[in-house]
Image (cartoon, rainbow, N blue to C red):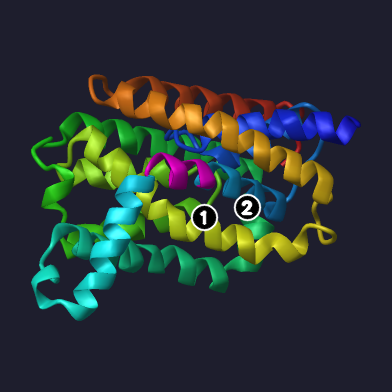
């Protein structure tokens, strides 16, 4: 029963933080350690993210259906090959390749070395500052209709940095999108779509690790956390898209810097163990 209650808390944290540019994986590493629960494990973190990606699939179902349909039609009908949705399908596939390839090649490093809290605290601060600078200096003159292959590759490379907990998948992609001149909502929307193949793939890849390995929780708590992350995450998507249409990312930048600094201080005084 205690593990199930912990799962509800961790699922809520995942749902609240996955789509905000503040790194859900960092929160799932820092707060369980702060609560005295220990590291829930890389596999647990990856699998419960399937819940939040299911929320993306449902929330963006019309966009995904339209993109998928156009992408398939482009194979058979030449007139569809220049269509934005058909190109978007390719952009998402190509943009997902860096994080997929590096995720497989660096699996052991990701699951052990990268989960060090000294690294996480530092990346929270550094990437928060990067997000703040990119957001403030952005030309803000591109919509999602302006996306090009080069932009898709660059945002895909940025997303791959999120293999390091503390970077934030959405935060890294949004930072690159803003640096390239995309409007906040366009950068955020594309970040959500780009994450689908990588997150779902990583979750499915790690399913086999749940019953054993370095994971604290078994199937029951993992399933509960996944369901909770879906429910909370769905609400978070709608809120974030409304928020960024009129406001900056400054509150998230400040939060990242404060959390990262607090993590490093707690490590230094021995409250947290790396």
Contact? badges 1 and 2 (CB < 8 Å): yes
Query: Along the horizontal axis of the image, is 235 left or right of 242?
Result: right
Query: Along the horizontal axis of the image, is 142 left or right of 21?
Result: left
Q: CA distance from mark 1 to mark 2?
A: 7 Å
> Would you place residue 191 above or below residue 228 in this image?
below
Of residues 68 and 101, which is closer to you in this image?
Answer: 68
User: Outermost residue, right direction?
Assistant: 1
- Sort mark 1 into few (<14), some (14-19) or many (20+) by Cα contacts within 10 Å: many
Instruction: Measuring from the top left, give residue 221's x and y in whole percent.
Output: 80, 42
Q: Which residue is mark 1?
A: 199
- Sort mark 2 into few (<14), some (14-19) or many (20+) by Cα contacts within 10 Å: many
Of residues 210 and 33, which is closer to you in this image?
Answer: 210
Q: Which mark is residue 46?
A: 2
The local secondary structure at tag 1 comes to: helix
Magenta segment, principal secondary structure? helix
Of residues 152 and 259, which is closer to you in this image?
Answer: 152
Residue drawn at 51 percent across, 38 percent down: 18
Q: Does any portion of residue 253 appear in the rendered image?
A: no
The quarter holding residue 71 reads bottom left
Residue drawn at 44 percent across, 54 percent down: 196
Q: Is residue 217 magenta?
A: no
Residue drawn at 63 percent across, 26 percent down: 265
> Would you place residue 232 above or below residue 67 in this image?
above
The quarter holding residue 247 reads top left
Residue drawn at 65 percent across, 46 percent down: 48
What span is colored magenta in the figure? Answer: 54-60
């Amino acid at each position: 029963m205690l593990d199930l209650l912990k799962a509800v808390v961790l699922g809520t944290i995942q749902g609240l933080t996955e789509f905000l540019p503040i790194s859900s994986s960092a929160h799932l590493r820092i707060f369980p350690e702060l609560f005295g629960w220990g590291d829930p494990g890389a596999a647990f973190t990856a699998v419960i993210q399937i819940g939040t990606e299911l929320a993306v699939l449902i929330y963006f179902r019309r966009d995904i259906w339209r993109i998928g349909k156009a992408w398939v039609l482009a194979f058979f009908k030449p007139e569809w090959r220049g269509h934005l949705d058909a190109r978007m399908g390719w952009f998402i596939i190509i943009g997902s390749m860096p994080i997929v390839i590096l995720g497989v090649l660096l699996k052991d490093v990701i699951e052990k070395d990268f989960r060090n809290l000294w690294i996480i605290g530092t990346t929270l601060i550094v990437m928060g500052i990067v997000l703040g600078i990119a957001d403030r200096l952005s030309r803000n003159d591109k919509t999602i209709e302006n996306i090009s292959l080069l932009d898709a590759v660059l945002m895909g490379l940025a997303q791959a940095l999120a293999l390091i907990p503390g970077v934030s998948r959405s935060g890294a992609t949004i930072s690159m999108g803003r640096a390239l001149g995309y409007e906040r909502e366009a950068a955020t929307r594309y970040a959500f779509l780009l994450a689908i193949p990588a997150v779902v793939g990583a979750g499915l890849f790690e399913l086999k690790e749940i019953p054993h390995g370095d994971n604290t929780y078994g199937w029951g708590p993992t399933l509960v956390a996944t369901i909770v992350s879906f429910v909370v995450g769905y609400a978070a998507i709608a809120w974030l898209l409304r928020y960024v249409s009129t406001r900056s990312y400054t509150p998230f930048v400040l939060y990242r810097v404060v959390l990262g600094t607090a993590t490093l201080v707690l490590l230094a005084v021995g409250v947290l163990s790396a």
